Amino acid sequence: MPGWKTADINPFSDASVWVDLRDRWPISNEIVSVVYSRHCMEHFTERDLQGIVQQCYRVLEPGGGILIVVPSLEAAVQQYLRHDFSFAPRLDQTEPIAKTFI
């Protein structure tokens, strides 16, 4: 997206910055207007998240904002119970027995 910088731990991605979010970010203090995270934070421990959120606040300019989006376990369970496997397309290609245990 124009004007946005992206971060990824994968050096083969097309991210603007390659960084492990658990480390100090190579970004100056108070220069970012918005930190946006989508389907990322749920992969970290609570301890890791404390450091990551501290990094968010460190780089945010005064008045900046944070938007964190994580998957909804409730929505996934409801879909599963309706046998709607669109949240995990590969399940639609599995044998019925696999859908019983996943």
Image (tube, rainbow, N blue to C red):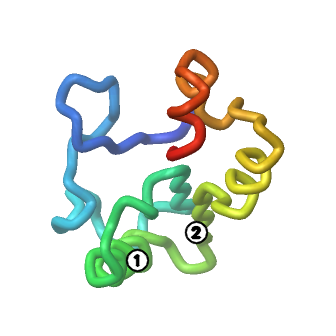
Q: Tell whether label 1 touches label 2 (CB within 8 Å).
A: yes
Q: In this view, does 96 lie above or below 76?
A: above
54 vs 30, nearest the viewer: 54
In which quadrant will I find the N terminus?
top right
**Which residue shows up at 58% across the image and 42% down it?**
100
| Image quadrant in which you'd find residue 89 | top right
| Residue lying furthest right | 82
* Circle 2: residue type: Ile
Q: Position of residue 34 (x, y in %)?
A: 57, 60
Q: Where is residue 38 in the image (x, y as percent from the top left)?
A: 55, 51
Task: Kindly identify which residue carries mark 2.
Answer: 66
Task: Kindly identify which residue carries mark 1.
Answer: 53
| Image quadrant in which you'd find residue 92 | top right
Q: Where is residue 59 in the image (x, y as percent from the top left)?
A: 38, 70
Packing grade of label 1 (10 A; few <14, some 14-19, many >=20) is some
Q: In this view, does 59 lie above or below 57?
A: above
